[in-house]
Image (cartoon, rainbow, N blue to C red):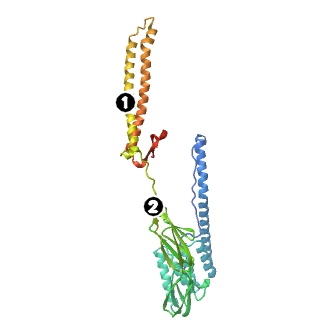
């Protein structure tokens, strides 16, 4: 940053003109031929997408860096102008530098030059006030207070201090007339006598007040601006109530809308509730609260489908569960019996095979007569057993699911040919 001292001329408190950027580069190690083509293409696509996304950010950062560099260059030139005695150019240079790079030290330099070199403490005072408001640490705040104390001592000999507060606080304040050179920063030293303080802000009516300032004595003026727009605030105890003003969606209640004076139509809506329409009239600057508590609408629920069994106390879901478990148990039992019979036939086949005489001329006929029938019977019963066990296990599992799963997960209704059976829908 740049500082101009009242006694030692210009000094550098840090770097002014140097702006450095660190860039990092990435290297791709390894052999290209060893990388899979799919991985390479994916990396290139990701790099292209990342470049597309970050390009605006890089452009914005470059613009910001360029503005800072230009501001530092202007500040360096302002220092040279101060050393050469060109104080008008010095003040102008620091003002333009601050607009590009808001360094608080530039404000300090402006106030110091106007105080010591230009000998215009009245112009220096608002810059010292601004320096105090943006000071970054205790050191800078101490410098600002020392400078303001020095200016107060000098200006109090011939001028009067005017302190202005406004509502809203960001109103622009002028002295006697509206012009760029009469803009006040809420506190200024002015010539003794009668003055008119003006204030204006967007969305408010201008305000003004007459004040008499005496030499060396502070005078306070408070200006309250009246809003030119009306404020319509809509509140509702209904959850997620949508607010519409003159047919335009304003947001979810509570919602505050700034609009023109006059008649307006307010509408509130929410799912499962009856909409509310209300016409209101607002005067200039008025703030109106509208309550929009909606009335719930009764939702007709169709009666559940009841079967004869349900009327006797058993729901279709329980009927389906018990039916599936009964069928499953029966199939598992049949499969077990069939598997036992298959095992018996395999044992008979093994015994018949052991009784064969391999040296007999009729061994093949004996095999077809005594062994092959047992093999065929055992294979058929084994296939039937496995089929029954599989289907029985599936049916038994379905019945258990229907029985133990929560009601909200299962829907059972009459189904099948002519509605004689049941159909179940399970939601996971």
- Mark in front: 1 vs 2: 2
| Front-lying residue, 164 or 300 | 300
| Front-lying residue, 42 or 244 | 244
What count of labels does the image hold? 2
Which quadrant holds residue 298?
Answer: bottom left
Residue 193 at what x, y percent from top left?
A: 55, 94
Which quadrant holds residue 172?
Answer: bottom right
Structural distance between the alpha carbons of marks 1 and 2: 53 Å
How many other residues sit within 10 Å of disc 1, few (<14), some (14-19) or many (≥20)? some
Residue 267 at what x, y percent from top left?
A: 53, 69
- Tell me the residue that label 2 is attached to: 298
Vertical arrangement, residue 345 with respect to residue 358, above or below: below
How many other residues sit within 10 Å of disc 2, few (<14), some (14-19) or many (≥20)? few
Q: Mark 2 and mark 1 in contact (Cβ < 8 Å)? A: no
Q: Quadrant of the N terminus?
A: bottom right
Helix, strand or loop under label 1: helix
Is any part of residue 9 visible from this angle? no
Helix, strand or loop under label 2: loop
Which quadrant holds residue 117?
Answer: bottom right
Q: Earlier in the sequence, mark 1 or mark 2?
A: 2
- Tell me the residue that label 1 is attached to: 333
Residue 103 at what x, y percent from top left?
A: 55, 73
Vertical arrangement, residue 426 with respect to residue 175, above or below: above
Left or right: 159, with 346 as reference point: right
Residue 23 at what x, y percent from top left?
A: 58, 58
Is any part of residue 274 visible from this angle? yes
Residue at 40% from the left image edge and 48% from the top image edge:
407
| Front-lying residue, 42 or 408 | 408
Q: Which mark is residue 5?
A: none
């Amino acid at each position: 940053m740049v500082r101009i001292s009242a006694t030692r001329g210009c000094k550098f408190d840090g770097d002014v003109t140097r702006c450095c950027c660190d860039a990092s580069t990435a290297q791709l190690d390894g052999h290209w031929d060893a990388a899979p083509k799919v991985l390479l293409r994916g990396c290139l696509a990701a790099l292209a997408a990342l470049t597309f996304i970050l390009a605006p950010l890089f452009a914005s950062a470059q613009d910001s860096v360029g503005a800072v560099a230009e501001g530092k260059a202007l500040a360096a030139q302002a220092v040279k102008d101060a050393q050469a005695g060109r104080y008008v150019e010095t003040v102008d240079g620091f003002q333009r530098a601050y607009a590009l790079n808001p360094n608080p030290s530039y404000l300090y330099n402006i106030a110091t030059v106007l105080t010591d070199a230009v000998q215009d403490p009245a112009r220096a005072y608002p810059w010292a006030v601004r320096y105090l408001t943006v000071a970054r640490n205790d050191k800078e705040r101490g410098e600002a207070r020392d400078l303001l104390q020095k200016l107060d001592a000098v200006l109090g000999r011939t001028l009067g201090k005017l302190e202005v507060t406004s509502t809203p606080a960001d109103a622009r304040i002028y002295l006697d007339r509206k012009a760029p050179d009469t803009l006040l920063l809420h506190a200024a030293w002015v010539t003794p006598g009668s003055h008119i303080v003006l204030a204006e802000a967007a969305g408010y009516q201008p305000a003004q007040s007459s004040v008499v300032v005496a030499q060396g004595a502070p005078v306070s003026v408070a200006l309250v601006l009246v809003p030119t727009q009306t404020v319509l605030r809509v509140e509702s105890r209904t959850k997620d109530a949508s607010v519409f003003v003159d047919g335009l969606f304003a947001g979810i209640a509570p919602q505050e809308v700034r609009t023109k004076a006059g008649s307006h139509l307010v509408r509130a809506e929410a799912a499962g509730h009856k909409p509310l329409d209300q016409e209101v009239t607002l005067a200039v600057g008025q703030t109106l609260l509208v309550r929009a508590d909606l009335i719930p609408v009764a939702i007709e629920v169709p009666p559940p489908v009841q079967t004869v069994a349900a009327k006797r106390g058993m729901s279709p879901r329980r009927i389906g569960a018990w039916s599936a478990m009964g069928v499953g148990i029966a199939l598992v039992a049949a499969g077990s019996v069939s598997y036992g019979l298959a095992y018996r036939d395999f044992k008979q086949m093994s015994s018949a095979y052991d009784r064969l005489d391999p040296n007999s001329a009729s061994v093949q006929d004996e095999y077809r007569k005594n062994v092959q029938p047992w093999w065929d019977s055992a294979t058929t019963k084994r296939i039937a057993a496995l089929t029954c066990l599989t289907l029985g296990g599936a049916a038994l599992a379905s019945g258990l699911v229907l029985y133990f799963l929560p009601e909200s997960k299962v829907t059972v209704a009459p189904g099948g040919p002519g509605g004689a059976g049941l159909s179940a829908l399970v939601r996971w």
